[in-house]
Amino acid sequence: MIDALRQRARELGLAAVGIAPATDEVTRAFGWARSVVCVAISYLPPHFDTVAILSSEELAYRRSDLLSASGVEDDVPRGLVARFARGADYHLVLREKLARLAEVITQEHPAARAEICVDTNPLPERKLAVLAGIAWRGKNGCVFVEGCGSWVALGEIVTSAPIQSGVEPPQSKDLCGDCTRCIDACPTKAIIAPYQIDRSRCISALTQAGRAIAPDLRAAMGNRIYGCDICQEVCPHNAGIEPVTPEFAVDVFPGAHPELMPLVDLTAEDFREHVAGSSIGWIRRTRIRRNASIAAENLSSEVER
């Protein structure tokens, strides 16, 4: 079974596939579960340049980066979107691939139940990916997959089929060593210790949260309106990663650097027509307007200095 899953995963363009046991967290959500098929996919689009690691002087929250749009040649105030949300919604891309991968399970186990999960169920995705042997955890809290670095999205098929992994239980890895680049680079000091993230300070979490954002954290957000890549951009394990997934090459909203003022003034009608179905639409109009307003204020403050 595992060999068939690996072959189908390669055909579908998935970066990795493995089997994790149905942990307590899984069986609390799915009492019938016996196995979890874990997969990873690289979300970097093929037109994206090979990843180069930023030095401390090149971090994206510098004043020079706030005032530019990373190569966009105009004077329009623009925001910055994390790489995982710049194009096609990875939830949709990965869910479709998992549905096709699940056919391998049902062919051998016709009576088996299978539930596809892509960031929509209370599953410890990163823990399961490590248990499945497809990933290792970094000090920045992200998981890293061979050949993809941490530029990955995770998904699972929870099934009642008793699938064997075919490999020895994975050993825990510590490939970070003494490196603290991600900890040092975080502008809000959200990485409070290796592998420990204070989500109340994490910029990526702040852009998605519904609560008010404290003034000191607002300034640290720079022109980011959704997500944050800083701790990944400075990680040596992300150097030289080659983009591979064509589905993420689709040119759709929001892109990397959307104009800010249309988002600040976003009407309910424009949201429904242009934004709701995008990769950032799920945080709804109020949060998008809030984030765009913070970014515009930060840009204005930098211009005045």
Image: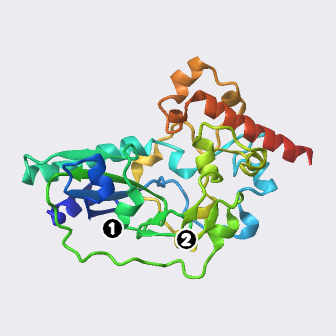
Q: Is residue 153 above or below residue 236?
A: above
Q: Residue at x 33, y 67 (%)?
A: 131
**Residue 130 x/y as whole percent:** 37, 67
Q: Nearer the viewer, residue 296 or 217?
A: 217
Residue behind mark 2:
239
- Kindly tell me whether residue 227 is visible in this rendering: no
Which quarter of the image is occupied by the N terminus?
bottom left
Q: Residue at x 19, y 57 (%)?
A: 34
Side of 288 relative to 89 (left or right): right
Please tell me which of labels 1 and 2 falls first in the chain: 1
Foreground disc of the pair 1, 2: 1
Q: Residue at x 30, y 43 (%)?
A: 96
Q: Nearer the viewer, residue 116 or 212?
A: 212
**Residue 197 x/y as whole percent:** 58, 60
**Residue 200 x/y as whole percent:** 63, 50
Specify the label residue 213 is tagged with: none
Residue behind mark 1:
131
Q: Amino acid at mark 2?
A: Ala
